[in-house]
Image (spheres, rainbow, N blue to C red):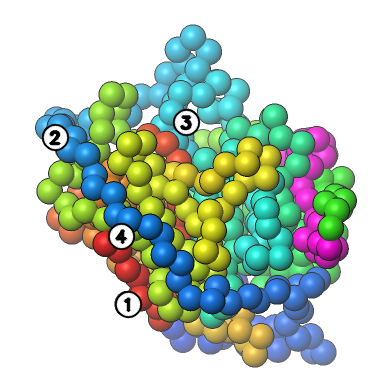
Amino acid sequence: MKYKKLLCLAGVVGLMVTSLAGCGKEGSQKENVSPIAETISPIEEAAGGNADPGAEVTPETVETVQPADTGHLYPIIENREVVDGKIQSYLTGEWVDEGIGTRRPIAVSIPNQKSCFPHYGIANASVIYQVPLRDNLTRLFCFFEDFDDLDRIGPTRSIRDYMVYIGLEHDAIICHWGSAYYANDLLNSDAVDNISQATQGISVPTGEAFDKYNRGGSYNSTDSAYLFVSGLKKGVEKRGYNWSYDDSFEPKFLFAADGVTADYADAPAATKIWPGKEGNYNTVGAYFEYDASTGKYAYSEYGSPLIDERTGEQIKVDNIVLQVCYAEERDDHGYLIMEMHGPVTGDGTMYFFTNGKVVKGTWSRLNGDDKPAKYYDENGNEIVFNQGKTFICEIWDKWADSITYE
């Protein structure tokens, strides 16, 4: 990763409320240029109301772990060392092959409208973000470190500038296919290692990484667009990107040490979670349901489990974050500008779910675009994540009051 002083790029997205409006005008100041829609407009389907996620599950009682003398609420992974060819992952805290745990992840933009289901390969993602695109649509942004056994990932779609900034949190190689008008300046800069299909505005495309895949049935052309792993690796080599983490890399998550459960015993129980009962998350019918027997949260959309086509299994995670961010519409298409970094709008409210509990607190990302958002409880203690997969929903503050859990 060729990091610059990335805060100088904040003008691409805007940092103050007054500059947010300026970003919306940036394209219109270019002669004969107007915001470019995606190659194929998203298919917007209503969820038809919230599905009943079923009966509530009572969390198991877990023995409380006393705080360690490290200053954190629970003993955490501190020194990552190779043991018998394995190392603990930056993304999950779990033991993985050294070649996987020391390799920068790829981040893939994946559409989330019903027409593109099922997704292929997303069960391999270590971290999944879901972000608003408009008032009635979301997109998935999946981070993979373990992808060598996949032939393809997708389908893939275009990216947004705020998604690129999420990618920088993890020092990821960012992959997408589609017109990305507001993200192009950032993608084309030296600050971002990207694998992008040849679409308007991409200065150096990497077309060998992408192709259409015959899915059969009635899938349209856009929902048949995939990232192919063999082409991705050729593209990374061609572009001269480094697979090793940058020296300035700072891990996003604090993970509980081996054998430790961050149980948050005094926190309220929360076994069913709706990221929003209004707005874009309501449109996709998003909800999570906790299973105390496994300690995992199963994710559903549009009234059905979200299934990985390759494994045939529902997406399940160990940690959930609902991160409330400032956003506003930036043009007549309803495209959003969303702030996930400082110094003015780089913090806010967050809800953390793990082990059947909910911890309300705050998030902060004020120290530069190459530094990750961090999460804190209401006493200012940094959140300790349980080892495993994490799902982060970025919530437009317009719909923050519709976050629901029980």
- Quadrant of residue 124 within the rendered picture: top right
Q: Is residue 337 above or below residue 67?
A: below
Q: Which residue is mark 1?
A: 401
Crowd around label 3: few <14 · some 14–19 · many ≥20 (10 Å): many
Query: For the residue marked with disc 2, what is the amino acid?
Result: Thr
> Which residue is located at x 28 percent, y 24 percent?
259
Label 1 element class: helix
- Can you tell which of label 3 and label 1 is closer to the viewer? 1
User: On the picture, is 144 further left or further right than 33?
Assistant: left
Please state the extent of the stretch shown in magenta in the rendering.
218-242
Q: Which residue is mark 3?
A: 89
Label 2 element class: loop
Crowd around label 2: few <14 · some 14–19 · many ≥20 (10 Å): some
> Which residue is located at x 35 percent, y 44 percent?
291
Q: Which residue is mark 2?
A: 64
Task: Find the distance from the CA under tag 2 to the CA under tag 4.
Answer: 21 Å
Q: Earlier in the sequence, mark 4 or mark 3?
A: 3
The quarter in which the N terminus is drawn is top right
Q: Is residue 242 above or below residue 46?
A: above
Q: Which residue is mark 4?
A: 351
Q: Earlier in the sequence, mark 3 or mark 1?
A: 3
Query: For the residue marked with disc 3, what is the amino acid?
Result: Ser
Q: Earlier in the sequence, mark 1 or mark 4?
A: 4
